[in-house]
Image (cartoon, rainbow, N blue to C red):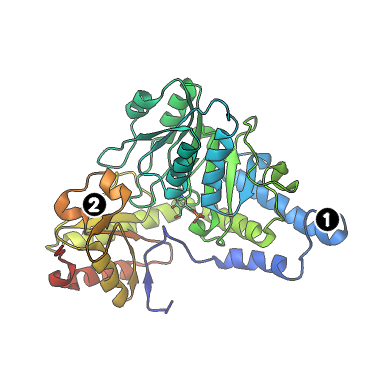
Amino acid sequence: MSKTMIYADHAATTVLSPTAYTAMQPWLKDKYGNPSTLYSLAREPRKAVASARETIAACIGAKPKEIYFTSGGTEADNWALTGMAFQYPNQRGRIVTSCIEHHAVLHTCDFLDRMGYGIDLLPVNRDGAVSSSMLEDHLQDDAILVSVMLANNEIGTIQPIRELAKIAHCHHCLFHTDAVQGVGHIPIDVRELGVDMLSASAHKFNGPKGCGFLYVREGISIEPFMHGGAQEHGHRAGTENVAGIVGMAAALEEHQKQLAQEMTYLHKLADTLLGHLRETDLDFIVNGSAERIPGSLSLSFRNADGEMLLHRLDLMGTAVATGSACDSKDAVLSHVIRAIGVPNEYKHGTVRITLGMDNSEKDVQSIAEQIVHIPVSYTHLTL
Ligand code: PLP
């Protein structure tokens, strides 16, 4: 990406932090031993993986043995759901999840549905939040697991996880949360939240791509995800991605140390962008609840076309995401924008702007100016 490009799609991925990059380097070349072998070349990588496990556990209030390294958020979500469901192969109980989960959860539920498990999808309110009463209403006796994301990747809404986990437990159900958009961005303590499993992904908090983890509370039994080795407490076989794991720990620790300042900065930056846009005569609504991931904004512009907005902004040097994609015949809305019921004249004009620590006040001013300069004729949906 050119230096002049404004990157405002941090919910999609983030740049590798220099700290993580430096921490990874020795494990990519010189210290290449396989942590599972017995000679001295393996000792250092083995220690590095153990130390990363301790660091990550400390960042989320867990014990090191409760952290299982994975290839990312998708794997962690797949494992949490299938690993729990496969504990009850004869029972084929129900899994309760929200209708705005990431596809890593929703498509795993589709798979489990085909395997004979029951799936219940919880509705959300206009803010994209799952309420305690909605969960109470949907929990039947044969439910085995509730999975509700900590923060939504399109609209940033933070869910009342502690309350929801409490309700699940009252119904003798385990609780998983996909915290991929939350870890490294808001304070997370697994004991305070009361969750049994939690998924995270390194590339969402300036760590490397293809690396993540699943927290599984001590005492919870889960089926192994991969077979063929003793790695990850015998539950996820395969030689460890040592550099990735070390980089992930370094990146998370770095965020953790400055979390309060980062949150304040990003909330302010998002407010500044909203302020600039509100000074114009643009007609738009802000999606999601007031309690959102810092720096996250989902905006729906009246009578606009989100995909066109994305491409026009790209031409002007800004990278954002959209909540609606267009093909020649049909406008395809994201399941999240559909579920929260964005009004018809706004829903096709949705863009997601997710700011990061590498964005400045000048960036958000430019983004606002660029949006204002996009001619209505380019944004108007003529379908
Ligand atoms: N869950 C959520 C909420 C996400 O936003 C993402 C990625 O966008 C994932 C899961 C998948 O994570 P990964 O890209 O590490 O597989």
Q: Quadrant of residue 322?
A: bottom left
Question: In x, y percent, where is residue 254?
Answer: 56, 57
Q: Nearer the viewer, residue 335 or 264?
A: 335
Per the model, the C-alpha gap separating discs 2 and 1 is: 54 Å
Q: Residue at x 79, y 58 (%)?
A: 44
Residue 37 image label: 1
Q: Is residue 374 above or below residue 83?
A: below
Q: Secondary structure at mark 2?
A: strand
Q: Is mark 2 within 8 Å of ligand 1?
A: no
Residue 253 image label: none
2 and 1 marks in contact (CB < 8 Å)? no
Q: Residues within 10 Å of mark 2 (few under 14, many from 20)?
A: some
Q: Is residue 239 above or below residue 15?
A: above
- Residue kind at label 2, given as amino acid type: Val
Q: Quadrant of residue 302?
A: bottom left
Q: Which residue is mark 2?
A: 286
* Left/right of residue 287 with respect to residue 236 in the rendered view: left
